[in-house]
């Protein structure tokens, strides 16, 4: 039985099927690919819900199949091969063997590139294993961990989230290294997901890259509006309230169905349990979210040069810009020459402050964009 939580509109991680909305088609495609031995590339804009989708899929696979192991790794914070190796080794070894003492002995005897440590968890009193990678032994360690996976003969599903990070490591052979082991292990199937879609596509769709055409591809978009409204209204009704189609549609349309922003607003509204859900309450909820982050937003602006800030403000006020070097746009906001705009644009794209959507450039964080527009209009 799932644990009940205070607010059903989850904005981080994954709780249980009760708090997961729709994605039936995506789940079916992912499940079909993995269960038939096909690795998958999963792409989406950030905060669209791919992490929750992966974890929900893993929940369903473990419920459906006996003795299956699922491992999720978010590579976003890794900066080099050593950090990847440490995360990979500790995630795999910790999942495949939960007995700390046995795991410590196994690492010591079979994986020479790791330096294990055995400590006591202060809260539980139980032993736990930590690992460090011996400098210069990263490639050997990766080989040994893949061999450990292979010899276990356990059916395993591994998700590398933000997998495009490996293409940014200073070491240049990481993709080829991983591909050489992944293609020869048949009891483990992989999801390679990412939010920097152009980088992920380049890794898997370019004939020059090691992972070329090695996976099935799936892009996830917005949740169907009708399904999402029913999901939200169900929880509000349990609270003794209701959200009309019209009110929900206004939120869905304003944020173009982007999952995290809708969840965040619904979460905020749910917390105001003594109020009728109307346009005024929605506006108040959004303003509260923006006020909570005002100091962070100002600090973020301070990181950039004047030309970059001017361009960011212009895009925020416009909402969406299809031709960012057009003379009319540059003139309207008194920007510098097109070459300077391109340079500023590249920095903002690299830092994921701006994002190129299908219909034009937008501020990646919609709430940040709204704050800029209202502050500097």
Image (cartoon, rainbow, N blue to C red):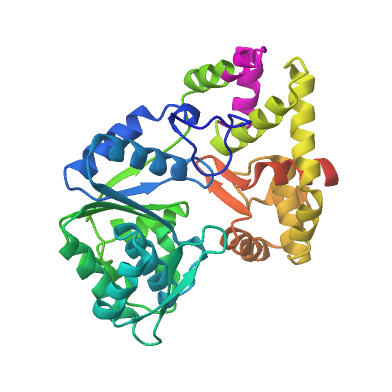
On whether residue 238 falls in the magenta region, the answer is yes
Frontmost residue, 12 versus 202:
12
Q: Residue at x 29, y 46 (%)?
A: 217
Q: Could you say where residue 83 lies in the image, as x and y percent from the top left?
A: 45, 73
Asked if one can make out residue 183 in the rendered structure from this viewpoint, the answer is no
Asked if one can make out residue 197 in the rendered structure from this viewpoint, the answer is yes
Q: Could you say where residue 59 lies in the image, as x and y percent from the top left?
A: 36, 39
**Residue 60 higher or lower than 237, as above or below:** below
Q: Residue at x 79, y 35 (%)?
A: 287
Frontmost residue, 16 versus 27:
16
Q: Could you say where residue 251 lies in the image, as x and y percent from the top left?
A: 64, 26
Q: Residue at x 24, y 51 (%)?
A: 39
Frontmost residue, 109 versus 120:
120
**Residue 169 higher or lower than 219, as above or below:** below
Q: Residue furthest front?
A: 125
On whether residue 184 falls in the magenta region, the answer is no
221 relative position to 300: left or right: left
Q: Give the residues in magenta.
A: 235-256
Q: Residue at x 61, y 13 (%)?
A: 237
Give the quadrant of residue 54. top left
Frontmost residue, 288 versus 251:
288
Q: Residue furthest bottom?
A: 136
Q: Quadrant of the C terminus?
A: top right
Q: Could you say where residue 68 lies in the image, as x and y percent from the top left?
A: 25, 47
How many callouts does the rendering have? 0
Q: Quadrant of the N terminus?
A: top left
Q: Main secondary structure of the magenta part?
A: helix
**Residue 212 higher or lower than 26, as above or below:** below
């Amino acid at each position: 039985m799932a644990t009940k939580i205070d607010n059903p509109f989850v904005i981080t991680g994954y709780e249980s099927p009760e708090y997961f909305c729709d994605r039936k088609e995506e789940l079916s495609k992912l499940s079909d690919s993995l269960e038939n031995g096909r690795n998958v590339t999963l792409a989406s804009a950030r905060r669209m819900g791919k992490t929750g989708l992966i974890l929900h899929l893993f929940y369903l696979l473990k419920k459906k199949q006996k003795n299956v192991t699922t491992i999720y790794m978010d590579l976003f914070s890794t900066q080099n091969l050593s950090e990847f190796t440490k995360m990979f080794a500790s995630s795999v070894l910790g999942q495949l063997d939960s007995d700390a003492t046995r795991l410590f002995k196994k690492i010591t005897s079979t994986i020479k590139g790791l330096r294990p440590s055995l400590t006591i968890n202060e809260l539980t009193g139980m032993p736990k294993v930590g690992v460090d990678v011996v400098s210069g032994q990263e490639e050997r360690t990766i080989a040994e961990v893949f061999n450990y996976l292979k010899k276990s003969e356990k059916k395993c599903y591994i998700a590398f989230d933000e997998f495009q990070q490996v293409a940014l490591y200073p070491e240049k052979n990481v993709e080829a290294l991983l591909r050489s082991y992944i293609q020869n292990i048949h009891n483990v199937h992989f999801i390679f997901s990412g939010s920097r879609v152009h980088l992920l596509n380049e890794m898997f769709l370019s004939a020059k890259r090691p992972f070329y055409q090695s996976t099935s591809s799936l892009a996830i978009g917005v949740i169907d509006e009708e399904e999402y409204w029913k999901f939200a209204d169900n929880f509000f009704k349990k609270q003794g309230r209701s959200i009309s189609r019209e009110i929900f549609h206004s939120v869905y349309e304003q944020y173009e169905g982007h999952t995290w922003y809708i969840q965040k607003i619904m979460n905020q509204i749910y917390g105001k349990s003594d109020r009728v859900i109307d346009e005024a309450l929605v506006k108040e909820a959004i303003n509260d979210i923006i006020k909570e982050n005002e100091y962070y937003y100002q600090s973020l602006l301070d990181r950039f040069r004047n030309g970059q800030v001017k361009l960011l403000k212009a895009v925020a006020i416009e909402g969406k810009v299809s031709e960012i070097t057009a003379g009319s746009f540059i003139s309207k906001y008194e920007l510098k020459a097109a070459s300077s705009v391109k340079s500023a644009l590249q920095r903002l794209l690299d830092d994921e402050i701006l994002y190129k959507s299908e219909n034009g450039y937008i501020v990646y964080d919609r709430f940040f964009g709204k704050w800029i527009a209202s502050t500097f209009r």
